[in-house]
Image (cartoon, coloured by chain):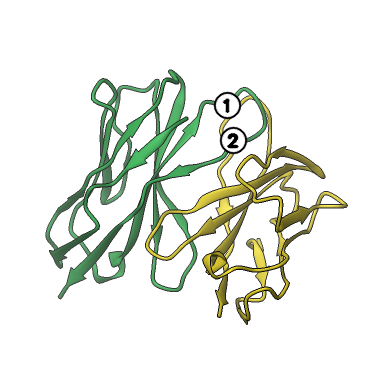
Amino acid sequence: EAGVAQSPRYKIIEKRQSVAFWCNPISGHATLYWYQQILGQGPKLLIQFQNNGVVDDSQLPKDRFSAERLKGVDSTLKIQPAKLEDSAVYLCASSLGLAGGYNEQFFGPGTRLTVL
Amino acid sequence: AQTVTQSQPEMSVQEAETVTLSCTYDTSENNYYLFWYKQPPSRQMILVIRQEAYKQQNATENRFSVNFQKAAKSFSLKISDSQLGDTAMYFCAFMKGLNNAGNMLTFGGGTRLMVKP
């Protein structure tokens, strides 16, 4: 079974530029998460989707970050404009999203963003 | 809000020895899950072990076991017979108990473990 796919794996941009990351979850997984992992820290949730609806985006800096999951499968996370402090690894995770029980989250390899 | 604290930024252990990684957490929830995740260098995060808060018995997965002290809000990971492949960042994580289809993970800051030959 294919895992969570992310692209690109690495991205270097200048500050104030825009960037987009793509995630393809495991087939059949209804819940999709984007986490930001700053170097030396644990991941922090940015946004959670259930199918194509947003469950939690309370920690997403909405003035510059946006995310969508239009058809309830793939997702795109965008930063516009980027700041130096956005340098991090952006992790995508997915889970089955079945109500009433534990759903393991499976992580992708991440996209390492460097903002110069 | 939940917080997860890992007080050991770095640890090292000799191959075949045993090492224990510490984690404490703070929550007002009664139903929750605790996890240890492994993140090898430049590789993706994988689940090592899971503990349900309602279970008194400590979880075990082969060489990995936990010491779950609910009253003390402590959740340590013991790795027995350490192997070179255990070298990685280890993250302790918390998830609220589920009444719906999915909940976020709250991670600690991580412990970098180096297994020495």
Residue A74: image x %, image y %? Answer: 78, 58
The chain drawn in green is: B
Tell me which residue sits at (46%, 70%) in the image: B43
**Which kind of residue does numbered mark 2 sit on?**
Asn
Q: Is residue A106 left or right of residue B25?
A: right
Q: In which quarter of the image is residue B30?
A: top left
Left or right: B115 as drawn, with respect to A92: left
Name the tint of chain A in the rendering: yellow
Q: In this view, does B84 lie above or below A100?
A: below
Residue drawn at (23%, 44%) of the image: B22
Q: Is B77 situated left or right of A36 in this image? A: left
Query: In the depicted view, which residue is nearer to us: B54 or A89?
Result: A89
Above or below, B71 against A95 in this view is above
Chain-order first, disc 1 or disc 2: 1
Q: Residues within 10 Å of mark 2 (few under 14, many from 20)?
A: many
Front residue of A86 and B37 = A86
Which residue lies under the disc numbered 2? B103
Residue A6 position in % (x across, y down): 66, 68
Residue B61 lies, in percent from the top left, at 33, 45
Between the residue at mark 1 and the residue at mark 2, the CA separation in whole angstroms equals 7 Å
Q: Callout 1: residue from which chain?
A: B
**Above or below, A39 relative to B32:** below
Question: Label 2 near label 1: C-beta < 8 Å?
Answer: yes
